Image: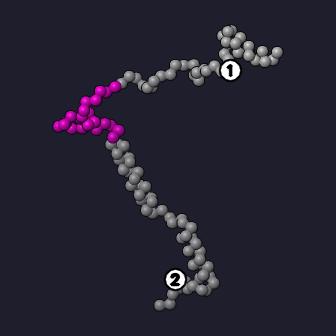
């Protein structure tokens, strides 16, 4: 009796217009929009950046800020990278070994050299 119920249940739901477990439903109830923006299309003119030969390119307002901002950030990064402290484990180990050898008297302190 239960096998008859499992075979007839999807048929009765489909006939009643109810969703079955195997039906495919959209993730969203709204229609999908293709492209996302207004229909703006500039047809190709064949000129590089749309500037004809002989015409001077006019900068847009954001281009100077973008150029000098990138240039300035690279200069700041270069200066910071050049003067960053040496934090490598090798440098620390070398200084620690030198300090311990000086404390044991095996190595002379370079600041206390006799002239």
Magenta highlight: main SS: loop
State which tag comes first along the sequence, 2 or 1: 1
Question: Which residue was labeled with disc 1?
Answer: 21
| Most distant residue in the top direction | 16
Q: Residue at x 61, y 79 (%)?
A: 100
Q: Is residue 77 left or right of residue 109?
A: left
Q: Residue at x 17, y 37 (%)?
A: 54
Residue 106 point in image, percent of width and height: 60, 86
- 16 up-or-down from 111: above or below: above
Q: Residue at x 53, y 85 (%)?
A: 112
Q: Is residue 38 magenta?
A: no
Q: Residues within 10 Å of mark 2 (few under 14, many from 20)?
A: few
Q: Nearer the viewer, residue 91 or 59?
A: 91
Q: Quadrant of the N terminus?
A: top right
Q: Nearer the viewer, residue 5 or 115?
A: 5
Q: Closer to the observer: label 2 or label 1? A: 1
Q: Residues within 10 Å of mark 1 (few under 14, many from 20)?
A: few
Q: Nearer the viewer, residue 96 or 16?
A: 16
Q: Residue at x 34, y 45 (%)?
A: 67
Residue 36 point in image, percent of width and height: 45, 25
Whether residue 58 is visible, yes or no, is no
Q: CA distance from mark 2 to mark 1?
A: 84 Å
Q: Is residue 25 left or right of residue 43?
A: right
Residue 51 point in image, percent of width and height: 23, 35
Question: Which residue was labeled with disc 2?
Answer: 111
Mark 1 lies on a secondary structure that is loop
Whether residue 111 is visible, yes or no, is yes
Q: Give the magenta range.
A: 41-63
């Amino acid at each position: 009796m239960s096998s008859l119920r499992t075979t007839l249940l999807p048929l009765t739901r489909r006939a009643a217009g109810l969703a079955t477990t195997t039906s495919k439903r959209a993730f969203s109830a709204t229609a999908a929009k293709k492209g996302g923006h207004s229909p703006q299309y500039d047809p190709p003119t064949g000129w590089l950046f749309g500037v004809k030969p002989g015409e001077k390119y006019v900068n847009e307002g954001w281009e100077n800020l973008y150029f000098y901002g990138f240039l300035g950030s690279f200069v700041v990064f270069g200066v910071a990278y050049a003067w960053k402290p040496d934090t490598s484990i090798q440098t620390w180990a070398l200084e620690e070994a030198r300090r311990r050898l000086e404390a044991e008297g095996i190595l002379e302190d370079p600041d206390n050299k006799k002239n």
